[in-house]
Amino acid sequence: MSFDTILLLGSGQVEQIFHRVAQICPPNIAVVQGAPHWLITEDNANNFMATFVKQVLDFLLAHAQNQLHIIAESQAAPPTMFCCAQPKYLSRLSHLSLIQPLGLTHNYYQSRRRVITLFRRRVARNMLRQFGSLLTDKYMRRNYRTVMKRVNLTNATIKHQFVHGLSVNSFSDLQQVHRHNRRIVIISGKHDTLFPLRIIKQNLTKYQLPIPVIRVPRVAHSSLATRQGYRLLKIALACRPRATHIATTNTPTSRDTNDASSAPD
């Protein structure tokens, strides 16, 4: 087992979606599927993600000697930031990349009674930004099918876990990582309506964190297996130490990988 980067995927990124992301990544990357939410119980709903990510990192770090670049996407971001803030993991971290992260927009979901309603509404708005891609990108369609099958928001336990997750504030963990001079970058789509970049940037200012933010035009919140999501992934992989180029075989077309912008909204 040889790798210099760990990529942790968000909710619902399992089965064919997980395999697709692993396929388009270059060598020496350990790709970790999204947490299996269907295993959540009432007893572990609040700490399920943290336990999953901790166990993954413990296993992978035991098989690596060098410092690692860790990439966390969407719902995998908060538990990854929490782990990376602990001395055991911090000493092994060289670079942290957060792709369309949860945990930095807690104030966007302040009304706990209406969190799921707000989330569903924002998912619908996000889908409108992807309508064209739903017609042309089979992995976009496959992702929505997988997520709908695996993330059941009518299940009371899963619903409770999502309410908890959407209200998580990860800034104390992020401050701890930043304080130890680890390289951090945040990458998000301009049209992400789930965890909007403008809210992330406002909160970074509030918590006095001068962390670079890369805004990718014409991208909504997307699975990394899709053409839109691939544009986010490509930027994160370019931050790898001695970064290698992504393999071009079976990857999205070049017209879907335009340069990103870090300009303000």
Image: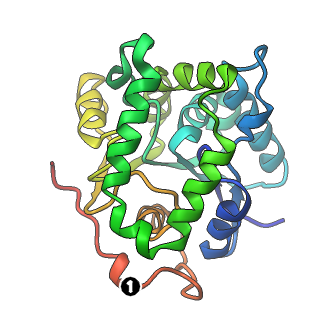
Residue 129 visible, this orientation = yes
- Amino acid at pointer 1: Ser
**In the rendered view, does 208 fall on the left or right side of 90?**
left
Across and down, in percent, residue 46 comes to 66, 18
Front residue of 75 and 133: 133
In the image, what residue occupies the spot 75% across and 41% down?
36
**Residue 18 at what x, y percent from top left?**
68, 60
- Display colour scheme: rainbow
Estimate the x, y position of residue 19 in percent, counting from the top left. Answer: 71, 66
The reply to whether residue 9 is in sight is: no
What residue is shown at x 53% (from left), y 48% (from top)? Answer: 73
Please tell me whether residue 164 is drawn above or below residue 205 in the rendered image. above
How many labels sit on residues? 1
SS at mark 1 in the image:
helix
Could you say which is closer to the camera, residue 223 or residue 205?
Answer: 223
Q: Which residue is mark 1?
A: 254
Question: In which image quadrant can residue 133 be found?
Answer: bottom left
In the displayed structure, 225 sits above or below 107; it is below
Decide which of 247, 153 is in the foreground and name it. 153
